[in-house]
Image (cartoon, helix red, strand yellow):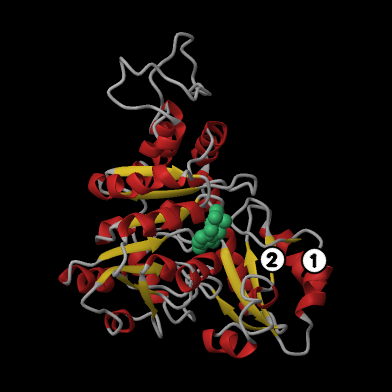
Amino acid sequence: MREKNTDLNTKCVHEGELPIDQYKSAVSPLYFSTAFDYQDQHLDQYPRYFNTPNQIGLNQKIAALDHCESGLVFASGMAAITSTLLGLLSAGDHMVIQNSIYGGTYNFVANHLKDFGIQHDFTAGLNADDFAQKIKPNTKIIYIESPSNPLLEIVDFKAIVARAHQSNILVIIDSTMGSPVNQLPAQYGVDVIIHSATKYMSGHSDILAGTIACSKALRDRIAKRAKMLGGNLSDLTVWLLDRSIKTMGLRVDAQNKNAMIMATWLEAQPQVDRVFYPGLTSHPDHVLAQSQMCGFGGVVSFELSKNLSAVSFLNHLKLIKRASSFAGVESTAVIPALTSHSLLTSEQRAALGISDQLIRFSVGIESAEELQNDIAQAF
Ligand SMILES: *Cc1c(COP(=O)(O)O)cnc(C)c1O
């Protein structure tokens, strides 16, 4: 497994701190102003331009955490994704996009991008060859998501980047499931790293936000469009997200450990047919995951055996909450066939390997023993 960066927690706590104010506070102050002196500033400062003091601080923290030159913080993961695609693509361009992808991204690419004259092709699978096969002369972007949701499949960063850069194609990743704690795609040459900060960065299921990290040149192209789209995050939430990220390293480490314990335990239960977790040697992408990740995350998916009702199982959980999001400190579970993937037909779901018995379990930081007891009584 890859080595974890030793300075991660220091960055989580201190990176992007604002200059010491007159009161010498230990925590950065919150500037709630929408108006700034224009004469002293070389920047035109305004919240929608992503350049208020608190935004500048958090943008810098995101860049440092994802090992990139620049960062930008958005009002949601979808604001980050749509602003990035509309910032980097123009009419006549083509993008290649992974078939198993977050539902909102799928919808935007499949149903909205064509209104801007932008073409796309979804891949047939997740191997580098599946992406290469869809490249056209006007392809400008390859878009990946790894680990994928809900089956935790892994995409090979090195192979995809090598193929894309041969043809001057940018690689964009939705790295939400990995988090900056568990993977650093920029170290493999991935050009734009996107997170729904609603998940591990927030970690408490109480903030909606998104981030991107990339070179300064790409950041400027994306920001030019993003300033018009108006998807910035309010400064109060910027300040709260900055606070949440201070404990991200600790939280995600605890979730990595708990998820590994739960995945191993679930694999041994007769009521479970199959467990999907990249940390298990039984996972088809385990070796690849080990080579490019330093932790496997808090999400474990599993298939209940056929004689159990998935809905009844979820209704009988007491400690683990039924909830559609993931990555919070509290454990949650969801049936993808009834939620995130309910708009697909059962044939389409079957083609993606998502059965009606599949449970996506987001493991929090509670005691693993109590989580096991809860699942055992719900069986
Ligand atoms: C949640 C999520 C998004 C969308 O983020 P929002 O903050 O809800 O807009 C995008 N990608 C992935 C992988 C997600 O889990």
> Can residue 214 be seen?
yes
User: What percent of the width, then of the height, locates residue 71?
Assistant: 36, 43
Q: Nearer the viewer, residue 239 or 295?
A: 239
- Residue beneath disc 2: 333
Quarter assignment of residue 316: bottom right
User: Percent x, y for residue 87?
Assistant: 34, 54
Q: How many marks?
A: 2
Labelled pair 1, 2 in contact (Cβ < 8 Å): yes
The x, y position of residue 45, in whole percent, is 38, 27
Label annotation for residue 258: none
What is the secondary structure assignment of the residue under circle 1? loop
**Residue at the disc numbered 1:** 317
Q: Is residue 30 above or below residue 181?
A: above
Say left or right for 48 vs 117: right
Residue furthest to the top in view is: 22
Mark 1 lies within 8 Å of ligand 1 (Cβ measured): no
